[in-house]
Amino acid sequence: MIEMNENVRWEDVKNSMTALTDEEKQEIDLMSDIISQIIKRRQELGISQRELEKITGVRQEAICRMEKMKNLPQLDTLVKIMLPLGLKLSVEKV
């Protein structure tokens, strides 16, 4: 088991998850990509998590847990967060 700290890479964590199926790992990868884009855009705009809470109505604590991948948000929460950041979610056939 990998000990979590600021220097742990997602790739290392994912590879250590032997109990997950390949499909579950793909789902986590997808969520990680989405959340990374949200973080990047929030930082580009200079918006703090607390400010994002005021704009979206999503609690700062929930935003923090999402950004740390401790909780994966539901679709409606993602939309609430993404729209004010000027982001949209699209679906592609893979």
Image (tube, rainbow, N blue to C red):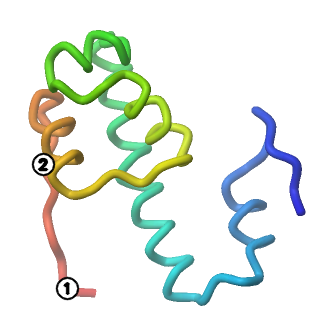
Name the residue: 60% across, 89% down: 21
Name the kind of residue labelled 1 in the image.
Answer: Lys
Query: Going from the N terminus, do you reach mark 2 or mark 1 first?
Result: 2
Amino acid type, callout 2: Lys
**Residue 18: percent from the left, percent from the top?**
77, 82
Q: Specify the quadrant that holds the N terminus.
A: bottom right
Left or right: 38 as drawn, with respect to 75? right
Q: Is residue 51 left or right of residue 87?
A: right
Give coordinates of residue 87: x percent, y percent.
Answer: 16, 41
In percent of the image, x 12 and y 33: which residue is there? Answer: 86
- Residue 11 image offset from top left, x and y in percent: 70, 61
Residue at figure coordinates x 44%, y 41% from the top left: 66
**Quadrant location of residue 59?**
top left
Q: Give the CA distance from mark 2 to mark 1.
A: 17 Å
Give residue 88's mark. Answer: 2
Q: Nearer the viewer, residue 94 or 65?
A: 65
